[in-house]
Image (cartoon, helix red, strand yellow):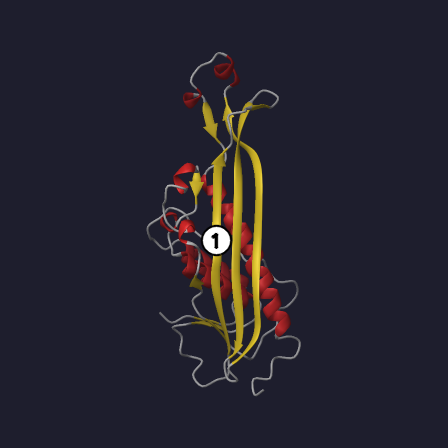
Amino acid sequence: MKIFLKKYSIHVIAAVTAAIITTSCSGPHVIGYSIDPLEGLPVKYATPVLVRNFADKRPVRERFTSDETEDFDFYSLDKHFKIPVDKSITKAFQIELANAGFEVADAGNFIIGEKPYIRITGEILHFNVIRQKLPDTPQYGKKTLWKRQQFTILVTIKIKVINAKARKLIMEHTYSSNDSFAMRSEMIDVKAYTEGKSLEKSRWQSADNYYSVQLLNDHLKSVLFQARQDVVKLLSPVELKLSE
């Protein structure tokens, strides 16, 4: 498949993102987020950027079911996502760069030809969110009883920027975003609890799997936005002299 992202408006970028994340595959969840518009007019860079598919270097325990993952209410595994993690993250970064004003191609694009270009590669080191039920110690609200869950998120991606003509590495940086917190997650009927009735029929799940995936997408956005900022800074205001 050949894709060349050039002179994209914000509306087109949004449409491309929607098309990417709705492609049918195995799992119910999607990796993707809305790209924030730039402040002011975007800069147009003459040098194209080739973004190769990021290598998936996540630990095995973050990708596949094991005895460890069965202890959690939700554990982000490959089977939970509609599109493979490496393809989704690569595409998100391509769109981030296109939104910043770069002409962006993927690894299957040959429009660049003999033209000098910047090559970007990446490694996905962690892309994981875990939701785990805390010990049964309900907390009272005004009229509601709550249970709590622990959320742990880690996104780590290494980015390399290469002067393709000079075959020179010009930037290498690892970006990471993480968090761990407990929050109210299950709302329980107070009367049923105080009367000792079964809680399974009298509680409502308020922090579901989609919330977990949203946390993951938020941290991915933070990581890729910072990487985009660094690439823009690296090539601005005077673009890299590819003859060097």
Q: Is residue 89 left or right of residue 176?
A: left
Residue 74 position within the rendered picture, expressed as x and y whole percent measured from the top left: 43, 40
Q: Position of residue 82 (x, y in %)?
A: 37, 52
Above or below: residue 169 compared with residue 186: below
Q: Residue at x 54, y 24 (%)?
A: 137
> In this view of the protein, which residue sits in the foreground, 15 or 165?
165
Total numbered labels: 1
* Residue 187, percent from left and from top: 51, 26
Q: Is the N terminus in the top left, top right, bottom left or bottom right quadrant?
A: bottom left
Are there few (<14), some (14-19), or many (20+) residues within 10 Å of tag 1? many
Instruction: Indicate the quadrant where residue 99 lies.
Output: bottom right
Label 1 sits on what residue type?
Phe
Front position in the image: 130 or 113: 130
Q: Is residue 172 above or below residue 32?
A: below
- Circle 1 sits on which residue? 127
Which residue: 38% across, 47% down? 80
